[in-house]
Image (spheres, rainbow, N blue to C red):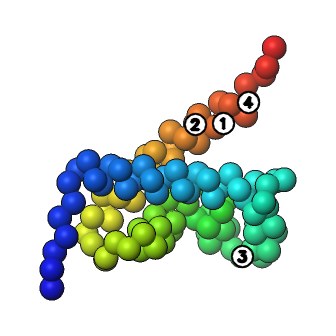
Amino acid sequence: MFVIQYSVLTLLQQATFISLSIIGLYSAMQEGMVLAFIPYLLASLPRLMRKPLFECLICMSSFWSVVIWFTTGNPLSWHLIFIIPAVAGLNTLADAFLGFIRDYKWK
C-alpha cells in the first residue's frame, strides 16, 4: 500500500476547488436555474437528508466534499478530516457574501 502525501497548499487548492464546485451546484439548483427540478424531485426526503444534498450551502460541504474528492481521483485518506471543515468554512464565507448580495438594495 502506498501513501500519498499532500502539502498544505495542495489541500487548500483542493478545498477551494471543492467549495467552488459546491457553490456552483447550489446555485444551479436555485429557482429558475438549470437544476431547479432536483429540489422538487427530492422534496419528499426528510429535512435531515435534504440539507446536505441541496438545501444548505454550508451543510452541503459534508456530503459533496466526499463525492467530489473521490470523483477527482483521490483515494480514501485521512486528509478528508481537514478538507471537509475547510470547505465548510469557505462555504460559510460564500453564503454570507451571497446573502449580502441578495439582500443588498440597489439605489
Which residue position holds label 3?
Answer: 45
> Mark 4 touching mark 1, by CB under 8 A?
yes
CA separation in Å, label 1 and label 2: 5 Å
Q: Position of residue 74 (x, y in %)?
A: 34, 72
Q: Position of residue 16 (x, y in %)?
A: 42, 49
Q: Residue at x 47, y 67 (%)?
A: 68
Q: Earlier in the sequence, mark 3 or mark 2?
A: 3
Question: Type of residue at label 3?
Answer: Leu
Which residue position holds label 4?
Answer: 103
Nearest the viewer among 60 and 17 is: 17
> Mark 4 touching mark 3, by CB under 8 A?
no
Left or right: 46 as drawn, with respect to 16 = right
Of labels 3 and 2, the one closer to you = 2
CA separation in Å, label 4 and label 1: 6 Å
Q: Quadrant of residue 95?
A: top right
Q: Badge 4, how many Cα within 10 Å: few under 14, some, many 20+? A: few
